[in-house]
Amino acid sequence: MTTGAIGPKITSLAWPLVLGNLLQTAYNLADMFWVGRVSGEAVAAVSLMFPLSWMFVSTAMGITAATIALVSQHVGAGERRKADRVVGQTILLALTVAVVLATGGWLVRHGLLASMGAEGRVFTDALAYIEVIFISLPFTFLFFAFRSALQGAGDTRTAMWLVFVSAGMNVVIDPFLILGWGPFLPMGTRGAAWATLASRAFATAVAVGILLRGGYGVRLHLSDLWPVKEDLTRLVRIGYPATLDGWARSSAAVVMASFVTPFGTAAIAAYGIGLRMMSVTWSVAGAVGQATATGVGQNLGANTPDRASRVTWIATGGTMAFLGAAAVIGLAFPEPLYRIFIDDPAIVTEGKMFMYVIAPVWAFFGGTMVIQGAFRGAGQTGVAMGLSLLSRWVFRVPVALGVAFSATVAVPWIDAMATLGFGIGVVGVWIGFAFGGLAAFVVAVLWFKRGNWTEGILETGKDPPVSDATADATE
């Protein structure tokens, strides 16, 4: 990423990430497709759990954001062994956080669903789904550590192929466990979660084997799994804003889901399906943002900040053009897109309005994600976090609350605040969503143009010594 024409370099690095993210999205799309053959309540349950599941994925992405920045800059500076050590410390940190989250989530699962407004059959189906997702968290976190390590080294294709195989497994297993094909009993939403766990566990096992063998730009040395205070401190210092960024995004999604809940099963299902279709566009923008992070990190490591800036603007423009075209399709065919998942007139009608409000701002969502990737590659994860906080908690949530609700609608935990709203209904939630995306893009562009992100994060001479001979001997 430090030499040659930028456009082809970005494309070469981004397309495996795009495909990998789209395949990752296939987990959710496949789950929704087959759950839609069970009942509307099952769709609503999985829809309600999507923001919570995304919170876990966002956490995994957050704590490995520092890995991309550090590995890419070490590689750009020609310090391969130091990049390897970052990988080992990342895996140690990721596994620890995953176990803590899984344990804590399991303990509070009932209260968590109740606080989101889940009731009756929706509560039961949501609980069956999320209990298994908690068990799968260590596999999810380890795979993101693997993916970030290889991405920082400039290899985006290996993880893509693993996600391809894993997503294929999920698609094949889903109907057997959800609907009870063959010798299996129908498990509904719990079956969808077990299919996801099985496919993620397989991908993670292969990923760990690849890192141990090496040959893909970085290698996992067993000696690097012993805690090193300096490395863990740096990973946490650089990564915690990205983790908070992920929590800001995903917790806001949980709150937005709770805003939708009072408007009924059709609104919940339409929201969930709409988010899954949006996740396709997020997959593209997020992948280009990841490629941008690598390009920015390597160029800052090579002391070429002007090229890092050009990488960002070219990636942003290309992403927004692509997502603009996708938005046209969404606006032209909202009803057929929703009927892929469920043929319920009430849900399709709600979904049509969702698309009319949200699709016009898809390109702005994507542009912000790419610029955030540039900040992460520079190690400026705090800036990326600030953009997420502004987008969700300053622009999106207050606008949705104020426009959607009136005193006639009971909303869990916010009844008093609801009296201040205009009360136009669930469309107000969609409006808040769209406004947050547009406003955040404007702030992101202005912030990036300030140019105070170009110094990088490597601290020359402050790394503890690393011996290849010692590492090899311990293995």
Image (spheres, rainbow, N blue to C red):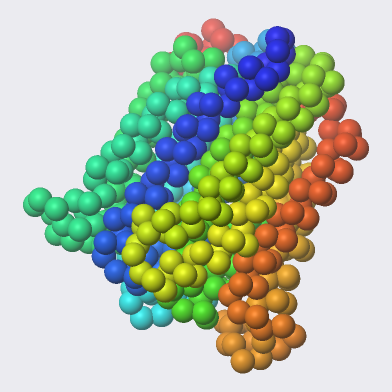
Q: Residue at x 73, y 71 (%)?
A: 398
Q: Nearer the viewer, residue 14 or 83?
A: 14
Number of numbered markers: 0
Q: Would residue 224 be seen by someone viewing this image from the given angle?
A: no
Q: Position of residue 420 (x, y in %)?
A: 75, 85
Q: Residue at x 67, y 60 (%)?
A: 434
- Rendered position, 327 above or below 9: below
Identify the image quadrant of residue 14: top right
Q: Nearer the viewer, residue 267 or 210?
A: 267
Q: Residue at x 70, y 47 (%)?
A: 364
- Rendered position, 217 above or below 208: above
Identify the image quadrant of residue 78: top right
Q: Residue furthest front?
A: 332
Q: Position of residue 259 (x, y in %)?
A: 58, 74
Q: Would residue 354 be seen by someone viewing this image from the given angle?
A: yes
Q: From the image, which quarter does the N terminus lie in?
A: top right
Using residue 62 as the reference point, say whether residue 188 is left or right of it: left
- Rendered position, 90 above or below 120: above
Using residue 347 as the reference point, say whether residue 453 is left or right of it: right
Q: From the image, which quarter does the C terminus lie in?
A: top left
Q: Residue furthest left?
A: 183
- Rendered position, 76 above or below 129: above
Q: Residue at x 45, y 27 (%)?
A: 159
Q: Nearer the viewer, residue 159 or 219?
A: 159
Q: Position of residue 321 (x, y in %)?
A: 66, 37
Identify the image quadrant of residue 229: top right
Using residue 271 as the reference point, say whether residue 86 is left or right of it: right
